[in-house]
Structure formats: structure tokens, C-alpha cells
């Protein structure tokens, strides 16, 4: 039996499964999360929902994450874990909401426009 949550951030998408009665194992694309993510900030980000609800070690977490960069993937996993925890127990909503873990960060990379070098950077203007 498992609970599923989907998290997104920029172009990263994470499918998170919380397996009930687990030993606390946390796998991201088949690797332990500390091995997959090199930065301490990403470790903290991924574990934030479990810490907010005091459920560390109660679930085995398996994650399939695609797209984006490393930090974007960590943020997507954070949201996916939070949403899966809501399926486990809807009473966790207040704790997750107070830590701002249920809000989708909608910021995306702005598209490049024709005639410009990037989204807003224009070629240098020459008068003569």
C-alpha cells in the first residue's frame, strides 16, 4: 500500500510514493537522496515535509523525477512528498501550509522573443 503525490517546479516533475510501514528509506531515481543530491540545502528541502509533520522514518519514499536542474528537482520532490502526506492524513494540511509546502511555485523561464538575444536582452544599439 502506498500514497502518491505529484510535484512540479520549473521544468522538473516528480512522482513520489510513500510506502506505509517503512524503515525510512528515501530513494530518488533508485539512489539514496543524499547520494543523488550533493547539496545540504537540497537534502533539507526534500526532507522538509516529513520534518514538518514529524513523520521521518515512518515511510519508505521512492521518487521518479525528470527534467529541470538539481535544485528544481529537489523543490518538485518537496511538493510531491507534501501532497502524498496529505493523502496519508488530511490533518497534516495545517502543518504543511504553515511551512508553505503546499504552494506551487509558478515561476518559469521566460521564452525567447524573435529579434532579441534572450527573453529581454536586445542587440546593442548603434547610432552610426
Image: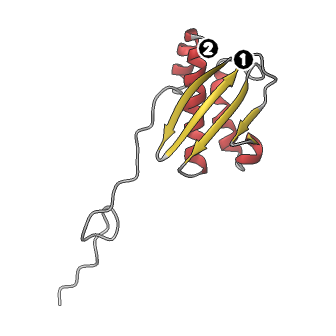
Q: Residue furthest right?
A: 23
The residue sitting at 56% across, 52% down in the picture is 69
Q: Residue furthest front?
A: 1
The residue sitting at 45% across, 33% down in the picture is 104
User: Relative to residue 8, is residue 27 drawn left or right?
Assistant: right
Quadrant location, the C terminus: bottom left
Mark 2 / mark 1, whichever is N-terminal: 1
- What colour scheme governs how the chains and residues are painted in the rendered image of this protein? secondary structure
For the image, the number of numbered tags is 2
Tell me the tag on residue 87: none
Query: Where residue 28 appears, x then y in whole percent?
Result: 69, 40
Query: Where residue 88 appears, x then y in whole percent?
Result: 61, 14
Q: Residues within 10 Å of mark 1 (few under 14, many from 20)?
A: some
User: Relative to residue 64, is residue 103 drawn left or right?
Assistant: left
Q: Residues within 10 Å of mark 2 (few under 14, many from 20)?
A: some
Q: Helix or strand or loop: what does disc 1 sit on? A: loop
Q: Helix or strand or loop: what does disc 2 sit on? A: helix
Q: Residue furthest bottom?
A: 128
Q: Which residue is mark 2?
A: 88
Q: Are marks 2 and 1 in contact (CB under 8 Å)?
A: yes
Query: Where residue 49 appears, x then y in whole percent?
Result: 62, 26
Q: Which residue is mark 1?
A: 20
Q: Say which quarter of the image contains residue 110.
A: bottom left
Q: Residue furthest top?
A: 91
Quadrant location, the N terminus: top right
Amino acid at each position: 500500500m502506498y500514497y502518491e503525490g505529484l510535484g512540479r517546479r520549473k521544468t522538473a516533475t516528480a512522482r513520489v510514493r510513500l510506502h506505509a510501514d517503512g524503515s525510512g528509506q528515501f530513494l530518488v531515481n533508485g539512489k539514496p537522496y543524499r547520494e543523488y543530491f550533493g547539496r545540504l540545502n537540497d537534502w533539507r528541502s526534500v526532507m522538509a515535509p516529513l520534518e514538518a509533520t514529524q513523520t521521518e522514518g515512518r515511510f519508505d519514499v521512492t521518487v521518479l523525477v525528470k527534467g529541470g536542474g538539481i535544485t528544481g528537482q529537489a523543490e518538485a520532490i518537496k511538493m510531491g512528498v507534501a501532497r502524498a502526506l496529505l493523502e496519508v492524513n488530511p490533518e497534516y494540511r495545517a502543518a504543511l501550509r504553515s511551512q508553505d509546502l503546499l504552494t506551487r511555485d509558478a515561476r518559469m523561464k521566460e521564452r525567447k522573443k524573435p529579434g532579441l538575444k534572450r527573453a529581454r536582452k536586445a542587440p546593442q544599439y548603434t547610432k552610426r
